[in-house]
Image (cartoon, rainbow, N blue to C red):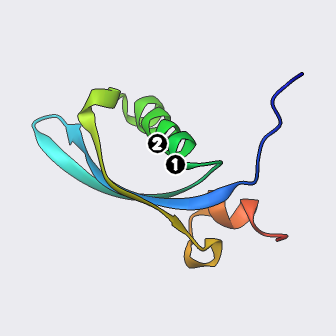
Amino acid sequence: MPKVAGAMKAYRAIGTYRNGRTNQEFTTDIVAEDEGDAEHRIFSNFGSRHGVPRRNINIISLEEINPSESIAPVVVSHFRNN
């Protein structure tokens, strides 16, 4: 039987990633099932968009947020009808 997605939550991640010789700070809001899924999505996102290996991404804090606190299009779109 296929796995069915659980209730999605909004998360805010704050951290740094290696950009050449410097560390670039980031803050990003994402939609994920749980903290483990949120971490995976952050690593995936920076890897695909910036070509950054997972070992060069440092997540300083990851916390669940109220979706209404976010202006990130992916969060606003996901929770629009809720």
**Badge 2 element:** helix
* Residue sitting at the far left: 21
Q: Nearer the viewer, residue 28 or 11?
A: 11
The reply, left or right, for residue 61 in relation to residue 3 is left
Asked whether the viewer can see residue 77, the reply is: yes
Rendered position, 61 above or below 69: above
Q: Please, what is the three-letter code of the amino acid marked with disc 2?
A: Glu
User: Residue 68 appears in which quarter of the rendering?
Assistant: bottom right
The reply, left or right, for residue 48 in relation to residue 22 is right
For residue 80, the mark is: none
In the rendered image, which quarter contains the N terminus? top right
**Badge 1 element:** helix
Q: Nearer the viewer, residue 28 or 33?
A: 33
Residue 50 percent location from the top left of the image = 37, 35
Q: How many residues crowd around disc 2 within 10 Å: few (fewer than 14), some, or many (20 or more)?
A: some
In the rendered image, which quarter contains the C terminus? bottom right
At 17% from the left and 46% from the top, the residue drawn is 23
Residue 52 percent location from the top left of the image = 33, 30
Residue 8 percent location from the top left of the image = 70, 54
- Residue labelled with disc 2: 39
Query: Could you tell me if the residues under marks 2 and 1 are in contact, i.e. CB atoms within 8 Å?
Result: yes
Q: Please, what is the three-letter code of the amino acid marked with disc 1?
A: Glu
- Residue labelled with disc 1: 35
Q: Nearer the viewer, residue 4 or 28?
A: 4
Q: CA distance from mark 2 to mark 1?
A: 6 Å
* Residue sitting at the far front: 1
Q: How many residues crowd around disc 1 within 10 Å: few (fewer than 14), some, or many (20 or more)?
A: some
At 56% from the left and 64% from the top, the residue drawn is 72
Rendered position, 44 above or below 63: above
Q: How many numbered badges does the structure rendering display?
A: 2
The reply, left or right, for residue 17 in relation to residue 27 is left
